[in-house]
Image (cartoon, helix red, strand yellow):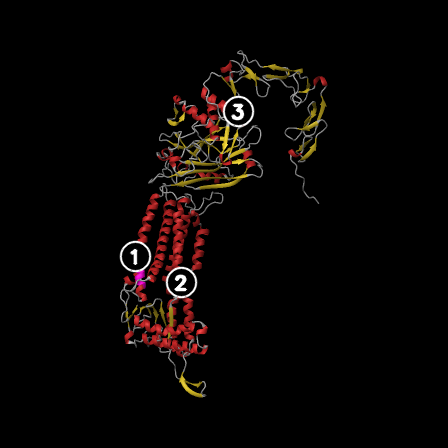
């Protein structure tokens, strides 16, 4: 089954003998002696046949004309005698400067057509019109040159105009157009027809339309200037230079009377004067009336022949080749909104929509003090312009630029070589248009310099328009001088970087004291560099967060504009700072990871054996009494709990991430990072969405992250740990209930101690006795848990003496032997016994050390100074006695 389908046929597919039936959307046959009409949707009679009847389509009846009246009238309904022959269409033809007359003045058909010569003498000065149907007054230049409608030698006929050989004509023009991107120079049919005549009419008669047409041809040649060329721009410059006597327009030195304004001067070097000498006389704001918050661009438009078309407001997408909604197109001219639009357009659509180029002179509208509306000319930076064969506008040095005025979007005219009715060989498209708005330095009231429109054209060699396409873009950017902000950032970086050096030196000094070494060696230098990497990462983080929040607050909250966001190209230093912070923090993280892997932790078991048990002696067959063993499970349990509290934080990472995402995406804080003037958290789906600013994105994200982290920290510290649970305090309580202390050395001579010795003497007991012990403790019937009598202090920072460390290392060394290669160790039983003895030895040593048994390795307990806590180092060195800090 075919379903609801039909073959696709187009009028061009029907051929000469068929027509396109618009009711069937298919080709149908024409009748006898008929052919397809010019439109393709009906049939007409072949040459030599007249129509008898016609109802459209194929409902046409044709009849052959008799031999004595072989011609067919223009309307195709009658046969007529043609005295001067027939055209290829079978109609009567007349000679040059003659008109064809087929009917009398009252409409009666003549038996024989008349060819009436138009009188070009002084009485009438008439000539036939382009259709050959009427005699009209001939062009004025014919009359001026020859006093007739005939431009005989030695007069010069060019472009439909006649000039006297005695006139002081401009130089002979070169009718070529150069397409530099393709390396192609071709002779333009439009230039060949109109260049010389436009230049001559402009030069001799100051014809306004001819001068505009000449200027347009110069613009189609990219305003390129060369001292040795007499192309369109060379002829324009010749006329411009030699008509200084005519004066200037509107007191603008570059705008010559009768001529279009094409250049700001005749050589590069004036761009800074044009763009920076004066500021635009309007104050812009982010919140105000339409005239304060919108850029009121207006353009004077001309066709290629030089005729003025109209004044056009740019709203509605006049300069935007990419289609979009009216709201989004108009958003380009909202002050402060960075606008970017790009798309790919087929060449066939461009040829269809822009068959005839339109030229624009762009202005920015403002109101004077007297209420009068004024226009400020907007300069154009054409990146394809060549001055003396050099692309002077493609560099960043403003002093080499040559600014122009007039521009176009699409030129599908100058690329036509031989026939203006055929497709062009090359088209030129404004593929990248950028309007740049620069804020006046140190302004507090939203004053800007004159805008600059930068245009880059793309040359397209037309081969297959249906498959060819071109990428086009339109953007509006806002910028200000960021040198002062950069200097302030550099100063901040220098100051904080210097402080980071001092802070790292203090950390290194504290680390040296904690390791018990006073020698500055290579390890010390390496440790200092690692400390400095972490501190410098903090410096970069502070600078980037401060920068992001500064731009977020001062850009989004301002009413009268005083700052504008950095351009993406100006954000490179900011991105570099973030990359440095990340890289240096990664180094600090690795150092922290290594430090955590080298920490020594020992769980001191205070439990003592209760009673004795009978034990068989292996190999002897004898049973002896021995001390009851102490259970190791309490130690394993505390070690497991220690591992679990390693991940305890003041913030919940999952909640932190989800909360930040919630505020960014659901509440809409991410909209604050858009490069527009709006500070609203919600945006309509129909409104234009500006591009992101990397600085604002980082500022918004960092501010939210820090705010939520701060609130979490306050919540956990003030509420959760007080009223719900404090896992660290719970762990200390558990140690005390288990009769286990934790001895931890993070450095050679520095670490931490959790005093978990049970006040009840033992913890390996049954439930009833455990409950009795807890009840006695609750009723204050036993001593307090602190290390010192009658105190509660159970957690300490410890700084141990060198002598104590050496004794610790001797015991620890035997513990570490079992980690060597298996082939170097004794049997597993001996290894286990050795480890067990070393463990018991270490447990007895540390227990006795805490109990002040070793007078030569004793310790004192003191409060740590506030400055010591802030600096993270200890002022006293434990030479003879170790120090326990509360």
Dot 3, how many residues are within 10 Å of its Cα: few (below 14), some (14-19), or many (20+)?
A: some
Name the residue tied to disc 2: 593
Q: Position of residue 243 (x, y in %)?
A: 41, 22
Residue 114, label in figure: none
Q: Position of residue 246 (x, y in %)?
A: 40, 21
CB-based contact (under 8 Å), mark 1 and mark 2: no
Q: To which quarter of the image does residue 378 belong?
A: top left
**Residue 612 falls left or right of residue 137:** left
Q: SS class of the residue under badge 1?
A: helix
Q: SS class of the residue under badge 2?
A: helix
Q: Earlier in the sequence, mark 1 or mark 2?
A: 1
Examine the rendering and report whether any part of residue 293 can be seen. Answer: no
Mark-to-mark CA distance, 3 and 1 = 79 Å
Dot 1, how many residues are within 10 Å of its Cα: few (below 14), some (14-19), or many (20+)?
A: some
**Residue 246 falls left or right of residue 470:** left
The residues colored magenta run 501-511
Name the residue tied to disc 1: 502
Name the residue tied to disc 3: 193
* Quarter that holds the C terminus: bottom left
Main SS, magenta region, reads helix
Residue 750 in the image: above or below residue 628: above
Q: Earlier in the sequence, mark 2 or mark 3?
A: 3
Dot 2, how many residues are within 10 Å of its Cα: few (below 14), some (14-19), or many (20+)?
A: few
Q: SS class of the residue under badge 3?
A: helix
Residue 157 in the image: above or below residue 755: above
Give 115 or 821, whichever is nearer the viewer: 821
């Amino acid at each position: 089954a075919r379903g609801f389908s039909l073959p696709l046929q187009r009028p061009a597919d029907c051929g000469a003998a068929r027509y396109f039936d618009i009711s069937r959307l298919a080709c149908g046959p024409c009748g006898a002696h008929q052919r397809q009409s010019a439109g393709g949707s009906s049939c007409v009679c072949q040459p030599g046949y007249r129509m008898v009847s016609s109802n459209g389509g194929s409902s046409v009846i044709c009849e052959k004309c008799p031999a004595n009246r072989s011609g067919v009238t223009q309307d195709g309904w009658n046969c007529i005698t043609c005295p001067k022959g027939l055209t290829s269409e079978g109609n009567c033809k007349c000679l040059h400067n003659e008109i064809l007359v087929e009917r009398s003045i009252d409409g009666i058909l003549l038996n024989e057509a008349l060819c009436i010569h138009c009188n070009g003498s002084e009485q009438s000065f008439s000539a036939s019109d382009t259709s050959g149907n009427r005699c009209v007054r001939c062009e004025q230049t014919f009359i001026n040159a020859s006093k007739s409608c005939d431009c005989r030698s030695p007069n010069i006929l060019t472009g439909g105009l006649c000039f006297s050989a005695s006139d002081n004509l401009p130089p002979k023009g070169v009718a070529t157009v150069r397409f530099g991107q393709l390396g192609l120079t071709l002779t333009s049919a439009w230039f060949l027809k109109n260049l010389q005549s436009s230049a001559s009419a402009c030069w001799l008669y100051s014809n306004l339309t001819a001068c505009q047409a000449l200027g347009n041809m110069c613009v189609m040649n990219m305003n390129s200037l060369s001292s040795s060329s007499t192309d369109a721009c060379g002829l324009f410059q010749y006329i411009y230079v030699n008509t200084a006597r005519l004066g200037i327009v509107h007191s603008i030195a570059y705008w010559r009377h009768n001529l279009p304004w094409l250049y700001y001067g005749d050589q590069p070097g004036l761009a800074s004067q044009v763009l920076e000498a004066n500021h635009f006389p309007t104050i812009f704001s982010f919140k105000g009336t339409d005239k304060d918050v919108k850029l009121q661009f207006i353009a004077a438009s001309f066709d290629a022949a030089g005729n003025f078309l109209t004044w056009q407001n740019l709203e509605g997408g006049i300069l935007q080749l990419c289609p979009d909604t009216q709201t989004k197109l108009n958003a380009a001219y909202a002050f402060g909104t960075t606008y970017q639009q790009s798309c790919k357009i087929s060449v066939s659509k461009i040829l269809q929509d822009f068959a005839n180029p339109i030229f624009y002179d762009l202005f920015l509208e403002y109101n004077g003090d007297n209420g009068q509306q004024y226009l400020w000319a907007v300069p154009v930076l054409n990146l394809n312009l060549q001055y003396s064969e050099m692309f002077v506008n493609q560099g960043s040095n403003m002093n080499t630029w040559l600014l122009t005025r007039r521009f176009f979007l699409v030129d599908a005219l100058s690329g036509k070589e031989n026939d203006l009715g055929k497709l062009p060989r090359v088209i030129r498209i404004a593929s990248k248009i950028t309007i740049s708005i620069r804020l006046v330095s140190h302004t507090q009231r939203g004053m800007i310099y004159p805008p600059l429109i930068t245009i880059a054209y793309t040359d397209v060699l037309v081969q297959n328009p249906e498959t060819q396409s071109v990428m086009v873009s339109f953007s509006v950017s806002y910028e200000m001088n960021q040198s002062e902000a950069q200097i302030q950032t550099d100063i901040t970086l220098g100051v904080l970087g210097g402080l980071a050096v001092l802070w790292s030196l203090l950390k290194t000094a504290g680390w040296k004291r904690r390791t018990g070494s006073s020698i500055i060696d290579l390890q010390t230098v390496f440790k200092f560099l690692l400390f400095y990497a972490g501190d410098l990462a903090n410096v970069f983080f502070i600078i980037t967060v401060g920068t992001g929040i500064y731009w977020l607050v001062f850009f989004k909250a301002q009413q009268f504009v005083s700052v504008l966001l950095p351009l993406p190209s100006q954000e490179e230093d900011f991105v570099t700072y973030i990359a440095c912070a990340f890289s240096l923090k990664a180094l600090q993280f690795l150092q922290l990871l290594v430090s955590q892997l080298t920490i020594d932790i020992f769980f001191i078991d205070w439990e003592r054996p209760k009673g004795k048990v009978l034990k068989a002696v292996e190999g002897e067959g004898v049973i002896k009494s021995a001390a009851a063993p102490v259970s190791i499970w309490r130690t394993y349990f505390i070690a497991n709990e220690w591992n679990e509290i390693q991940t305890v934080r003041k913030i919940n990472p999952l909640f932190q991430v989800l909360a930040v995402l919630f505020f960014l995406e659901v509440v809409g804080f991410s909209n604050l990072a858009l490069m527009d003037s709006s500070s609203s958290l919600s945006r309509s789906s129909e409104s234009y969405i500006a591009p992101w600013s990397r600085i604002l994105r980082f500022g918004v994200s960092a501010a939210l992250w820090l705010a939520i982290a701060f609130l979490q920290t306050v919540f956990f510290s003030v509420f959760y740990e007080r009223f719900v649970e404090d896992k660290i305090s719970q762990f200390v309580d558990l140690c005390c209930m288990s009769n286990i202390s934790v001895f931890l050395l993070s450095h050679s001579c520095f670490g931490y101690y959790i005093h978990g010795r049970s006040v009840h003497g033992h913890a390996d007991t049954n439930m009833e006795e455990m409950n009795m012990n807890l009840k006695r403790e609750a009723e204050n019937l036993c001593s307090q848990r602190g290390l010192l009598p009658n105190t509660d202090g159970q957690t300490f920072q410890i700084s141990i003496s060198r002598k104590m460390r050496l004794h610790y290392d001797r015991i620890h060394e035997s513990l570490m032997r079992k980690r060597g290669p298996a082939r170097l160790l004794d049997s597993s039983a001996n290894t286990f016994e050795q480890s067990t003895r070393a463990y018991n030895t270490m447990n007895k040593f540390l227990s006795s050390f805490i109990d002040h048994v070793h007078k030569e390795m004793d310790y004192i307990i003191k409060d740590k100074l506030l400055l010591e806590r802030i600096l993270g180092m200890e002022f006293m060195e434990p030479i003879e006695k170790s120090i326990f800090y509360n």
